[in-house]
Image: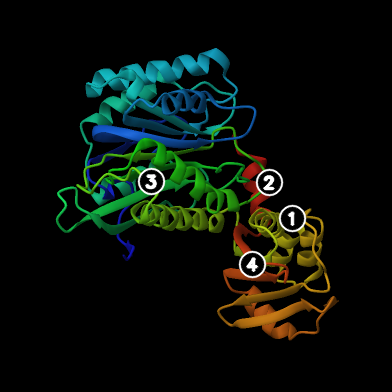
């Protein structure tokens, strides 16, 4: 069964609507609030930051997702993170959920809350409620509404991120197949170094799937998508990834880990992989996307650690920005990552659209064509293939270069 990329994002699946507005939370004259709504109660799965300091919306959402209660709406604001705000921050979540519930005619414990932005200030509740009231009347299942919502949750992002796929599953009726859709949106440009996933992300599907398997699929897919990106080594206080299922596609319920579950996981991986890669490419001040693929490692976890070490290295990032083919920096990042390997068996190749050069093999740095290396480093996407020659495990990680603009953006982030 084939997974097809389709146009759209959060509103691609049946039963999902979105709206956005300019609420003036922090930014002026730009979208800064989104409202996501489900026509039916949805099963919810989620993963959240591993940072010990968790923002109030994270604590609020964790309680609801872990309770197994159905979800009907999500209110998201940008500009102020509602983190480091103590009991007042939780009160603001309760008030936001209560107002949204009254406005939409749904239970308050069916409302999730998301915030992103500056840590410390309190979210202006009157602007939040005014935004919810304005958006409630403009909810739409159109692709345009989903796109606007994806723009409304941006902070320092330069582009919005959304993705969607469609695939076929057996019909609940027992005859033929039905089309199932899965889509979503995410934001994240700085403070990106996941130990869960680092961002705000909202995914929707109309697939009928048992809630425990929905959570299991999300937790598994995160490990090789959002957990494999890094921009600056900082794990946010607000990291939240939510997956909602309306079950309206009409497929036979997925309630066991069979081939239909595997297809669902593959579709979920496709969307999450696309969104994660877009986030890494749009890192604050970035001019390059760095991809690292580790092959033939002894274990999957070691492959992940090695790949992330390369894309997370400040020296590798600076090397890419400066277009300096200093392969020793990649070699060094692999060496201090932690997993044991034999440097004499390692092979490192750098590649791009214009070709590839072998940096290192047989325990020695190789002579290579400097002009060809410069052409590769002048491309937006630069890839390192690291063949460990130890086993069959592999992993990929994504990051971006380190530029002067990153310092400028974060040097005056509050102002």
Label 1, residues with CA under 10 Å away: few <14, some 14-19, many ≥20: some
The answer for how far apart the CA atoms under marks 4 and 3 are is: 38 Å
Q: Earlier in the sequence, mark 3 or mark 1?
A: 3
* Residue 33 image point, x, y percent: 38, 34
Between the residue at mark 3 and the residue at mark 2, the CA separation in whole angstroms equals 24 Å
Question: Mark 2 or 4 closer to N-term?
Answer: 2
Q: Is residue 292 left or right of residue 205?
A: right
Name the quadrant of the N terminus. Answer: bottom left
- As drawn, the label of residue 233 is 2
Crowd band around label 3 with a 10 angstrom C-alpha radius: few (<14), some (14–19), many (20+): many
Tell me which corner region of the image, top left, top right, bottom left or bottom right, holds residue 84: top right
Task: Say above or below: 241 vs 52.
Answer: below
Q: Who comes first in sequence, dot 1 or dot 4?
A: 1
CB within 8 Å, label 2 to label 1: yes
Horizontal placement of 270 versus 174: left or right?
Answer: right
Q: Are marks 4 and 3 in contact (CB under 8 Å)?
A: no
Between marks 1 and 4 in the image, the one whose residue lies nearer the viewer: 4
Residue holding disc 4: 392
The picture places residue 360, in percent across and down from the top left corner, at: 78, 76
Left or right of residue 328, residue 304 in this image: left
Q: Nearer the viewer, mark 4 or mark 3?
A: 4
Residue 150, label in figure: 3
71 and 312: which one is in front?
A: 71
């Amino acid at each position: 069964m084939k997974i097809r990329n389709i146009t759209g994002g959060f509103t691609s699946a049946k039963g999902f609507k979105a709206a956005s507005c300019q609420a003036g939370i922090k930014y002026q004259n730009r979208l800064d609030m989104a409202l996501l709504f489900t026509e039916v109660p949805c099963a919810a799965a989620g993963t959240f930051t591993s940072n010990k300091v968790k923002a109030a919306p994270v604590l609020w959402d964790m309680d609801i997702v872990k309770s197994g209660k159905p979800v009907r709406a999500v209110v998201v604001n940008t500009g102020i993170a509602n983190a480091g705000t103590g009991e007042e921050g939780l009160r603001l979540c309760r008030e936001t959920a209560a107002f949204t519930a009254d406005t939409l005619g749904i239970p308050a414990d069916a409302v999730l809350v998301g915030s992103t932005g500056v840590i410390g200030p309190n979210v202006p509740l009157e602007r939040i409620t005014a935004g919810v009231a304005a958006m409630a009347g403009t909810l739409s299942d159109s692709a345009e509404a989903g796109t606007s919502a994806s723009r409304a949750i941006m902070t320092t992002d330069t582009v919005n991120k959304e993705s969607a796929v469609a695939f076929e599953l057996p019909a609940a009726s027992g005859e033929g197949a039905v089309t199932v859709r899965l889509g979503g949106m995410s934001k994240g440009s700085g403070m990106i170094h996941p130990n869960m996933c680092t961002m705000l992300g909202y995914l929707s599907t109309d697939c009928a799937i048992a809630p425990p398997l929905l959570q299991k699929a999300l937790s598994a897919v995160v490990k090789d998508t959002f957990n494999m990106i890094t921009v600056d080594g900082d794990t946010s206080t607000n990291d939240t990834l939510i997956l909602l299922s309306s079950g309206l596609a009409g497929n036979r319920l997925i309630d066991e880990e069979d081939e239909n579950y595997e297809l669902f996981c593959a579709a979920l991986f496709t969307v999450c992989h696309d969104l994660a890669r877009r986030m890494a490419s749009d890192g604050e001040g970035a001019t390059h996307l760095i991809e690292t693929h580790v092959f033939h490692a002894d274990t999957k976890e070691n492959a992940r650690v090695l790949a992330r070490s390369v894309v997370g290295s400040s020296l590798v990032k600076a090397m890419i920005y400066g277009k300096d083919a200093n392969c020793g920096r990649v070699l060094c990042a692999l060496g201090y990552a932690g997993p044991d390997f034999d440097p004499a068996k390692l092979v490192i190749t750098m590649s791009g659209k214009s070709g590839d050069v072998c940096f290192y093999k047989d325990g020695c740095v190789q002579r290579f064509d400097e002009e060809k290396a410069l052409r590769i480093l002048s491309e937006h996407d630069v890839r390192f293939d690291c063949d460990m020659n130890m086993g069959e495990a592999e992993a990929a990680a994504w990051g971006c270069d380190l530029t002067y603009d990153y310092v400028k953006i974060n040097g005056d982030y509050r102002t």
